[in-house]
Amino acid sequence: MYIPHTKTDKEEMLKTIGAASFEELVKQVPSKFLWPKLNLPEESLDEAQSAVRMAELANKNCRPLSFLGAGAYERYTPAAVKAITSRTEFLTAYTPYQPEASQGTLQAIYEFQSTVSALYGMDCANASMYDGASSFAEAVRAAVRVTGRKKIVYSAGVNPQYMDTLKTYFAHSPDYTYVKVPMKDGAMDKAALPGLLADAACLAVQTPNFLGLIENMDGVADLAKKAGALLVAAADPVSLGILAAPGEYGADFAVGEGQSLGLPLAYGGPYLGLFSCKKEHVRQMPGRIAGLTKDKDGRRGFVLTLQAREQHIRRDKAASNICSNEALCALAATVYSALYGPEGLKELAECNSGAAAYAAERLSAIKGCALKFRGPFFNEFVLSVPGNAAKLREKILANSGVDAGLPLTALYPELGEALLVCATETKTEADILKLEAAIKEAL
């Protein structure tokens, strides 16, 4: 019901739909999700006055010094990323169906795929997906298709949002079963795997896991293969500057969230799904793939090579019903990765690891606080705190304008009162000392 519509327009629209009122039309939507009536001033404002009023409202917003992570990370993006992605050549990210008119876009997608393949140590990558959660779910679904099995074994350290998305994919059928591999000292208990993997379609693991700890993947692929299951590995792309790539430890599918590669934080995105696999699974890959070829004159050219999606083949035979890719976000990630290069990405990962290690050292020395786990971690860690973690976070935010991290009680009640604290390369020594002081004051 848009503002330009008159009362008569709205009545005619409702009559055509068959609803007596707008309220009846949206009655299925819980009231808490319906937009409230705007509290607009009685007097009319001209453009200049409106701008002043909006600025006054905007100034009420606060931007805390944030140590939140949990899958979305504050990182520094070089100015060149925005400068390049803002060029007129990239004004539209629409599917480049006509290669004769889309060589620039197709080449950018091809370079993105090459970047993801190199980062994850895999043979093939697609032209991006919605986000890390959809990439994870699509990889598991591909494993189900390959094996014909419906038992999904996953590590307890997998991002809970990834699992929520996966279960939504399979919500239509009660036949799917989910078996959680328990944690031991914050990481996957590998000793439990042989007894859990029988008849499994796949083992899904995330490293660094949701709690920031680095999983020991030695021999995991062999255990999965012995049981006839595939290995799906989710990994933060920045961590791969210093950690082993999924291809190195035998993953069949490797996925991740590309937000870390030059995309700003936002409420829900748009983010970027990274998806890669071994060559034998390339036809199980969702979305589309851009390929390199030659034209009739022998000149290099780029085309869409594979599109295993429902718009191009029968729906029941399609690898996926995902119809779009995050082309502009993928372009930003490609530019970001090219600017850093392998050595730059390594230095970036080392900065993240160092900042988190320093924060863990300072915060765990506070009376009543302690590191929950002693295993190696990347750029976030679990800090046990006295009292209620959620209330402590609120108190610190109110007192000091610092967001100390994510309370974990609701997600992992077995951990007790704890915060998931993240420190990326954007956090200076002064920032970490400010967080330390804020926690001390609140306690």
Image (tube, grey):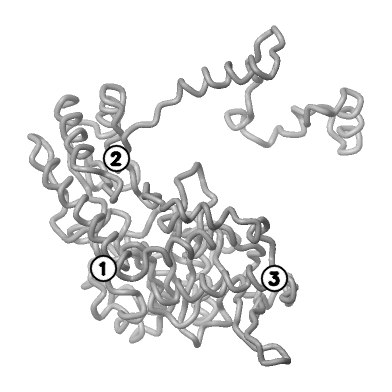
Q: Tell me the number on the disc at residue 102.
A: 3
Q: Please tell me which residue is depicted at 26% across the width and 68% down the height of the picture.
A: 242
Q: Which residue is mark 2?
A: 405
Q: Nearer the viewer, mark 1 or mark 3?
A: 3
Report crowding for label 3: few under 14, some 14 to 19, many 20 or more residues within 10 A (C-alpha): some
Give coordinates of residue 280: x percent, y percent: 50, 87
Residue found at the far top of this picture: 43
Q: State which mark lies toward you, 2 or 3.
A: 3
Q: Amino acid at mark 1?
A: Ile
Q: Amino acid at mark 2?
A: Gly
Query: In the shown orientation, is residue 147 left or right of residue 306?
Result: left
Is 139 positioned to the left or the right of 208 in the image?
A: right
Q: Secondary structure at mark 2?
A: loop
Dot 1: what SS? loop
Q: Nearer the viewer, residue 415 or 118?
A: 118
Q: Quadrant of the C terminus?
A: top left
> Which of the marked residues, 2 or 1, is nearer the chain's N terminus?
1
Which label was assigned to residue 410? none
Q: Residue at x 51, y 54 (%)?
A: 271
Quarter-of-image position of residue 109: bottom right
Residue 409, given in percent of the width and then of the height, sits at 29, 41
- Above or below, 100 relative to 378: below
